[in-house]
Image: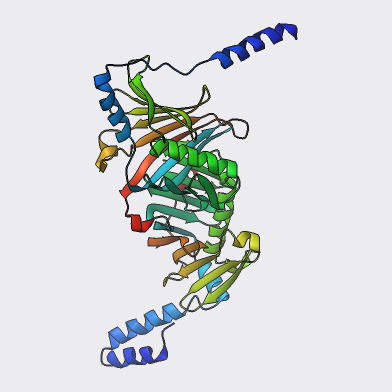
Amino acid sequence: MKQLFLPILLLFFLISCASLPSVSPVDPAAVPDIRQTCDHLFPEGNWEVVHAIEADMPGSRGGMMIGVTKISAEARTIETAMMTVEGFVVFQGRYAGGKVSVSRGIPPFDSLHFAKGLMEDIRLVFFEPEGGTVRVGITENGRPVCRYETEESGTVDVITEAGDGWLIRQYEGKKLRRTVHALPGEGEGKAASGEVPIPRLLELSATGGMMMPDYNLTLRLIKAEQVDVSNE
Amino acid sequence: MMNPFTEKRLLRRFRYRPGVTLAVLLAFFLCTGWGNSWEEIRSAAQQIRSVRADFVQEKHLKILTKPLISKGVFYFRMPDSLRWEYTEPVQSILLMYDGETRRYIQSSGVYIEDETARLQSMQVVIQEITRWLNGRFDENPDFSATLTADRRIVMTPKNDSLGSFIRRIELQLSETPGLMESVTIYEGEDSFTRLMFRNSVLNPDLDDTIFEEVE
């Protein structure tokens, strides 16, 4: 037992001492451009998006759902429904004013914990983190990065990749909770919605924590449409 | 069911054209010859050995500005073999053969088996579809079935717990005896799924591979 104790203790210290990835400073003249690039990765206005969602969880692979999401970037509201390919709605809920409400939930999609996690996933993908950037610079790999710190989402890094893709990393304290990899594709993602970056493909990895297992989601865009406020 | 007044007008119009009159009368006979009673429906279903049809699925949801359209094709062979295949916007195939149900989804151009627990609920749906195709609409212990005019069957859940998920199911029988025109599943008044069947072929020869193999 004593033999095991030391490595566990060491691991514990290593984890607690782990720090956020560094953001190295850049030429101050480059900061506005990087900041603007980060801003433009999040859609403005009101959107209706439909995705085919593939989920990978421990012990379960290959499930597909259809996700319908209506977002208002300015009001920061979300209405979403998850359904089977056959059209059976297993979850429907809303996020507004920082609160999550569920209007329909079929087990295992009926818990408030699931609803909150889902809304957090959607917020991370579509809403620019509140409060603005606290640091702008480059990553260890030399990619431009904007770091946000919010009460709502913790620390969020938005990193633009070579090509059209981008990465969003969310940290809870110093622990990586979620990673979103956005791939606009061969111009199709942007073409589907003009110049607005609703990516064709999104890959989301999340550590579920105490209440949920880790999961990976692949979201393929079926449809993205800008909608009127009157449709809200 | 055609009303008697319309029927008389039709007959008057075709009085001097015996061939057309005969055709109209024959069509009238065929249309009124099924779908008026559970017995007639069961009797028509007995003629079904297999069915192939295209389908269009409309998902209506309050948050959708336009219904979400899916398309596919289905094959059914007595007593319980089924292939339910979506071709767009996602590719998904459900196979039921020899008492086993499997579902596949296309991911990066390759079909992979869906191993999630949701398949259990799909099996219930599939059992229901095969029951309908056998003409046994009134045999589900969870639903009460009412046969209304114009060959419409309305199924309502018998208990509240099921009723909170499915308000009712409406089935519109086709003019062709034994076939269905559409199925509408109401989850709420502003949330429903409508399946419309097109290009139905009655009793085609369907090979086992259709129900056994994905491609």
Please give the count of numbered marks on the rendered protein: 0
Residue A46, above or below B40:
above
Can residue B38 be seen here?
yes
Give the image location of residue A77, x and y in percent. Answer: 43, 47
Q: Against A106, is A18 above or below? A: above
Which quadrant: the C terminus of chain B?
Answer: top left
Say which quarter of the image contains residue B32: bottom left
Which residue does the image show at 32% across and 30% down from the upper left?
A: A38
Please state the horizontal and vertical placement of residue A105, each as a whole percent of the image.
Answer: 57, 50
Residue A136 in percent (x, y) is at 34, 23
Q: In which quadrant is the N terminus of chain B drawn?
A: bottom left
Question: Which of the two residues, A129 or B19, is positioned nearer the viewer here?
Answer: A129
A4 to the left or right of A189: right
Residue A191 vertical placement versus B23 (above, below): above
Along the line of sight, the residue nearer the viewer: A30 or B6 = A30
User: Can you see residue B65?
Assistant: no
Of residue B89 and residue B15, the one placed in the foreground of this image is: B89
Outermost residue to the right:
A1
What residue is rendered at 30% in x and 16% in y? A26
Q: Is residue A99 above or below residue B154?
A: above
Its colouring scheme is rainbow
